[in-house]
Image (spheres, rainbow, N blue to C red):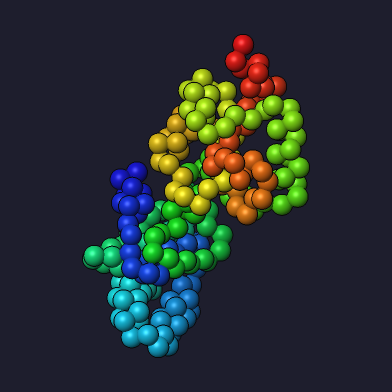
Amino acid sequence: METLQKIEQFKGKRNCALTLFIPPNYDFTKDIKRIYTSIISIKHEQKKKQLLPIIKTIKSHIDDKKIIGFGQIICCGLGQTLVYYQLNPRNLIQKFEYYYDYVFSTNMIKKFLFPNISYIVSNKTVVQRLNVYMLKDNLVYNNKIDGYLETDLIGTIFYFSNENLPIDLIEKTMKTKTKICIVTNCDHQIAKDNKIVGLLKHGLTSQLCCI
């Protein structure tokens, strides 16, 4: 958790926080060369100067090394100083992905570190289910979440925000074995009005829980 907290707190220069998700037994050579070539071709000299140490640092740590287990998560960025973090995921990384930003892709990192976290891209089915849950009064919202978690009444949490998923919330859900679904691109009214929503366990309604 300490390393994850440091990763969350990092604020870098524009596009100088690079997060890599590398599958096991993956030949990273072509990708590192491709990223390096794209940086070299940048016309803005200051931006190029900032990005080159990042990619060189990553290359020095993982070049020609076989990645085993469930893969590797790498965070390397330039803020006041150059930082490098390497994490071993607990969930399998199935395809290579990388992201540039001024912060690291912490919610995506958490998806691979904690077995109870998943990503869902909102679609018609997701919206229909939210409608059903709302009509059946199966949902609790925002500031009521903690109380329902403490009494172990929530089965799933829907997180609609792009903000960092709070580590203390993850710790609470790990104790109660509550699932967390990070829902992206959701235009449902529930998502517009709430950052976090809890789905009560089967057969429970918020009215019944208050009796």
- Tell me residue 28's x, y (percent): 46, 73
Which residue is painted at 59% across and 41% down in the image? 193
Which residue is painted at 71% across and 45% down in the image? 126
Which residue is painted at 33% across and 86% down in the image? 45
- Tell me residue 19's x, y (percent): 42, 63
The outermost residue toward the top is: 211
Q: Quadrant of the N terminus?
A: top left
Residue 176 in view, yes or no: no
In this view, the residue in front, 136 or 173, is 136
The outermost residue toward the left is: 81
Asked if 178 appears above or below 110 in the picture, the reply is above
Relative to residue 98, is residue 129 drawn left or right?
A: right
Residue 153 sits in quarter: top right
Asked if 79 appears above or below 122 in the picture, the reply is below
Q: Quadrant of the C terminus?
A: top right
- Tell me residue 2's x, y (percent): 30, 45
Looking at the rendered structure, the number of numbered marks drawn on it comes to 0
Which residue is painted at 31% across and 81% down in the image? 46
Relative to residue 147, is residue 201 drawn left or right?
A: right
Relative to residue 63, is residue 79 drawn left or right?
A: left
- Tell me residue 134's x, y (percent): 70, 32
Asked if 211 appears above or below 7 in the picture, the reply is above
Residue 125 in view, yes or no: yes
In this view, the residue in front, 64 or 164, is 164
Residue 171 sits in quarter: top left
